[in-house]
Amino acid sequence: MSQITGKVVLLGSSGVGKSSVFIRCTHEFFHPRTTATIGTLCYFKTFRIETTTVKLEIWDTAGMERFRGITYMYYRHADAALIFFDITSRKSFQEVKFWINELRNNCDNFNAPGKNLLFIVGNKLDLASQREVFRDEAYQYAREQGAVYYECSAKSGLGVQELFEDVAQNIYDKFEPNSV
Ligand code: GDP
């Protein structure tokens, strides 16, 4: 059985729920007041696709973005990037553009169209009644950026597993030469 490892970085402005999604994905629970520790966190999560084990190395900024402290090391050799915003905050959606630029400036993988795995993720789907960003608009924007669009809720868990399964599938398709 073969194994593929892919580095996945979580990006997005402070408060959008990156750490909560990270914890939901890796430990399957939600902590209502995530207190960010400073310094990156990294956790492995494995998926089985066909006869291949896809091991995602998922990196969380753990609050570094508040101090403009995300270093080149964080982005280095990333295979997939998940840029989060909060669907109840238009400001956080407008800031997605900033994060795409940061990614492109710091990681060459994201400058080659068609080769990078970029996901834009609207979090806090459990608060859909307070939406400031509509799905169609975000979906359209993601398409223009060559990104896949997802919505999820770290609080309810809705969409989180599916998101990371799709990331694993995309990494598999990219690296497994006979898969596509
Ligand atoms: P980060 O700064 O992007 O890592 O965001 P955090 O994970 O620290 O979350 C910021 C705040 O949003 C915390 O109070 C979380 O409890 C809350 N939060 C995160 N995800 C969700 C969600 O899916 N739904 C709701 N209602 N709150 C969330």
Image (cartoon, grey):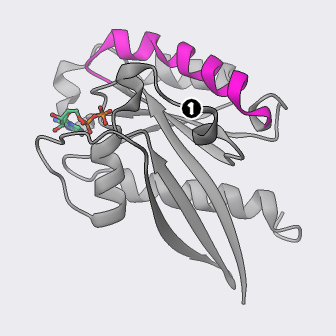
Residue depicted at 29% across the width and 56% down the height: 24
- Residue at 18% from the left image edge and 42% from the top image edge: 34
Q: Give amino acid for label 1.
A: Thr
Q: Is residue 134 left or right of residue 168?
A: left
Q: Which residues are magenta?
A: 87-108
| View extreme (right): residue | 177
For label 1, the residue is 71
Q: Residue at the location (18% across, 20% down)?
A: 130
- Left/right placement of residue 170 relative to residue 96 reads right
Quarter where residue 4 is shown: bottom right
* Position in image of residue 75 (x %, y %): 63, 38
Q: Main secondary structure of the magenta part?
A: helix
Q: Residue 59: image x %, image y %?
A: 49, 49
Seen from the viewer's position, the closer of residues 102 and 93 is 102
Residue 13 in view, yes or no: no
Q: Residues within 10 Å of mark 1 (few under 14, many from 20)?
A: few
- Judge whether 162 appears above or below 36 on screen: below
Judged from the image, the secondary structure of the residue bearing numbered disc 1 is loop
Q: State the quadrant of the C terminus.
A: bottom right
Q: Is residue 53 visible?
A: yes
